[in-house]
Image: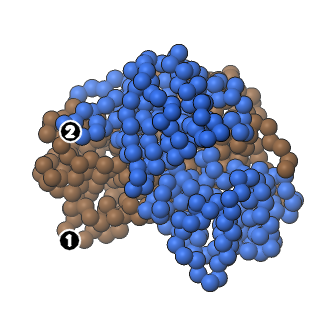
Chain colours: A blue, B brown
């Protein structure tokens, strides 16, 4: 088998955040596989390239299609938003690989990194992930809620800043509220909380609040939440949105 | 004041991972401020652009220089490797801003995200950060070792995959060993550990080992360490490096 499969991340929106390395992989691809939303963001395909867009939510199935095409000798790219290795397609591809055709292990499978949502969201606010931090997906489609609670508790005990992916969907409207309730029991009410919607796009929106006041109903599928550490702070500005950052040191010193 | 200051991340190496948005900011800059290593990675400057490279390790001082230039009305870019908001220059700029000239708060200060080291390192190995994960800097220049131990312990208790930045330097040769010792007390000896050196560059190297066998003396300033969660696993291949990934689900099912 001489086919290749490259799992790429387009970044948060459009292609302004897509790396040259990813654009090159896309140019060279004979086949591009992905969710409609991501395939639609790509520049038009040349005549040599087939596109396999689907609204299939079964990511493993999409991964198997991509691996089968690569096994036929095609040069396949699987597109994700953000970074493919962070709550996206790369893990699904390796899962399909591990439990799929033994011959697939001879394929040239690579991952090309992208700007994941929390980095774009943090950049919009300032530098809230400037100290140690965690990334937690709130989706319990693939793991138990008990595991999510265990991780939120540990993140609070470690005083990490916390980036919360997949905070809410139509099928899971209440889980962010439960997460905030848990965090309110372990962190001060004045802890900085950010709701960042559609970071990196022209519709990007930042809402700065506190853990005490955070309203979970304001989040949707395009929102990323950042809960600050004890050190996360605001820099107030006249008539403008404050900047939010987490100092690198535990005790900020004027210098 | 009409000056601007944009803190950008070049990604892990060269400019193959530098976003179009960052390249545009660099093109439009009248002044580029940064550590020699990063300024040297940039394409040659046009005649309109001044470059202020330094080997100054006092990041706050560099941030103040950049803010002063912006306050003079210049269009300033501060360059970081990786992502500027992850253990890099963005937090230093906001620290300098908060404790600096009050007039600096009127400046247009922005952050442009980049591919941070752990994403490039994870992509090289497969998808080891495919589940929930933490990022911890092992440098105790700016925080206490007690805080680092508290965070490593919490990360182990939460069964996160752990990306360890700044695992070692000439001044701190022993801390990664202490971190491994701590983790060995809370996680199984067979936990997957990755040493990834110079991810994203032509000298990139991946060493796959276990927590029981991990040798801290193999890390240097260009190494990023990933310690797996309990779910992180290898996909073995004939005559090739295994892929390493963390499944999205707690219990992988053949599908």
| Nearer to us in this view, B241 or A132 | A132
Up-down: is A56 above or below A157? below
Measuring 31% from the left and 60% from the top, which residue is drawn there?
B25
Q: Which quadrant would residue B128 be assigned to in this image? A: top right
Callout 2: chain: A
Q: Which quadrant would residue A197 be assigned to in this image? A: top left
What residue did someone put label 1 on? B47
Residue B239: tell me if it is visible. no
Residue at the top extreme? A185
SS class, disc 2 = loop
* Closer mark to the observer between disc 2 and disc 1: 2
Up-down: is B117 above or below B145? below
| Numbered mark located on residue A239 in the image | 2
Discs 2 and 1 share one subunit: no
SS class, disc 1 = loop
Measuring 25% from the left and 44% from the top, which residue is drawn there?
B62
Specify whether A209 is left or right of A153: left
Residue B94 % position (x, y): 29, 38
| Nearer to us in this view, B68 or A89 | A89
């Amino acid at each position: 088998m001489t086919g290749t499969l490259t799992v790429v991340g387009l970044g948060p929106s459009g292609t302004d955040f897509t790396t040259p390395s990813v654009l090159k992989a896309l140019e060279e691809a004979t086949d591009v596989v992905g969710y409609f939303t991501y395939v639609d963001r790509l520049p038009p395909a040349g005549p040599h390239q087939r596109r396999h867009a689907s609204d299939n939510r079964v990511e493993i199935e999409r991964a198997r299609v991509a691996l089968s095409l690569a096994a036929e000798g095609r040069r396949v790219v699987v597109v994700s938003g953000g970074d493919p290795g962070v709550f996206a397609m790369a893990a699904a591809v390796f899962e399909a690989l591990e439990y799929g055709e033994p011959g697939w292990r001879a394929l040239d499978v690579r991952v090309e990194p992208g700007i994941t949502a929390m980095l774009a969201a943090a950049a919009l606010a300032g530098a809230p992930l400037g100290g140690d931090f965690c990334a937690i997906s709130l989706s319990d489609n693939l793991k138990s809620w008990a595991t999510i609670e265990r991780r939120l508790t540990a993140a609070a005990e470690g005083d990490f800043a916390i980036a919360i992916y997949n905070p809410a969907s139509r099928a899971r409207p209440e889980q962010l509220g439960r997460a905030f309730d848990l965090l309110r029991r372990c962190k001060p009410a004045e802890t900085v909380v950010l709701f960042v919607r559609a970071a990196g796009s022209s519709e990007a929106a930042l809402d700065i609040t506190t853990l005490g006041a955070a309203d979970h109903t304001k989040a949707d599928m395009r929102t990323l939440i950042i809960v600050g550490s004890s050190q996360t702070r605001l820099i107030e500005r006249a008539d403008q949105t404050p900047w939010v950052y987490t100092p690198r040191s535990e005790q900020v010193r004027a210098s």
